Image (spheres, rainbow, N blue to C red):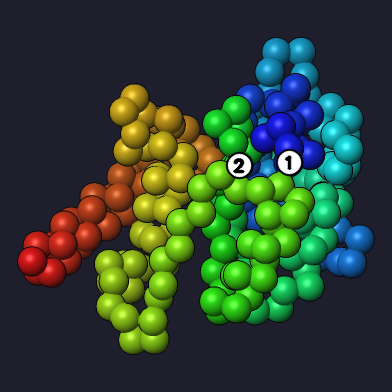
Amino acid sequence: MASSGFNDLLIPCSRLEIVAHLSVSESGVRQLMRCEFRDGFGPEDLSNSEFLTFETALHGDNESPPIVVFNTHPLAIASIDFPDIAVLPPYTFSEDGISISLRGVPKGISSFLSLANDIMPPDNVKVINEEEGEIGPHKLLGDRQWEVVQAAVQWGYYDEPKGVSMRQMSERLDMARSTLGEHLNNAEATIMRWLVNQE
């Protein structure tokens, strides 16, 4: 975080999560995010960051309603010039660092990582090669199941101790806890059967 240019976001927030890209322009990216604010801080304090401008808070039923910001970080602007990659929300900023997922063709991913190395060198890069026609467990899951499983892993639901509770996940995903539990149980069963069949 220290070399990313985003470290000042951890003054008002203990955790910040980009959940969607609303619009993209040459000057920056309008993003929908959720923040866990520290005591005494609120959405307006995000504008104290060099690269973020708070625009509005949306109405929500939970403690951390979605917030709209405009992001002018060099990496956000640079990613616009890479038509063969996609930055996949949700991604997070916390005291543990930044976690970002990309999808795209190998040349595009490689070029983007070279640029990222100049702006904020990653300390960990994991590459998964998805060949045409490859059958992996994510291909067996529905779109909503895959979204829930990705969120659970990224937010630390399977970590010990848990990084997020089922209640917190249901609030962040704006989904009933029973529906979330059903998606997770069905996805876990599908993935376990796939693993056993691979052996």
* Pick the front one: 166 or 125: 125
* Pick the front one: 2 or 8: 2
The reply to whether residue 176 is visible in this rendering is no
Which residue does the image show at 29% across and 71% down from the upper left? 136
Residue occupied by mark 1:
4
Q: CA distance from mark 1 to mark 2?
A: 9 Å
**Rendered location of residue 1, percent (x, y):** 67, 35
**Rendered location of residue 33, percent (x, y):** 68, 44
Residue 154: numbered disc: none
Q: Which quadrant holds residue 186?
A: bottom left
Q: Is residue 17 left or right of residue 41?
A: left
Q: Secondary structure at mark 1?
A: loop
Q: Is residue 135 left or right of residue 104?
A: left
Q: Secondary structure at mark 2?
A: strand
Q: How many marks?
A: 2
**Rendered location of residue 139, percent (x, y):** 33, 73
Q: Dot 2: within a 10 Å radius of its alpha carbon, few (fewer than 14), some, or many (20 or more) residues?
A: some
Which residue does the image show at 75% across and 23% down from the upper left? 12
The furthest residue to the bottom = 133
Label 1 or label 2, whichever lies nearer to me, is 1
Question: Mark 1 or mark 2, which has the lower sequence index?
Answer: 1
Q: Is residue 16 left or right of residue 157?
A: right
Residue 98: numbered disc: 2
> What amino acid type is highlighted by mark number 2?
Ile
- Contact between marks 1 and 2 (CB within 8 A): the answer is yes
Q: Which quadrant holds residue 127?
A: bottom left
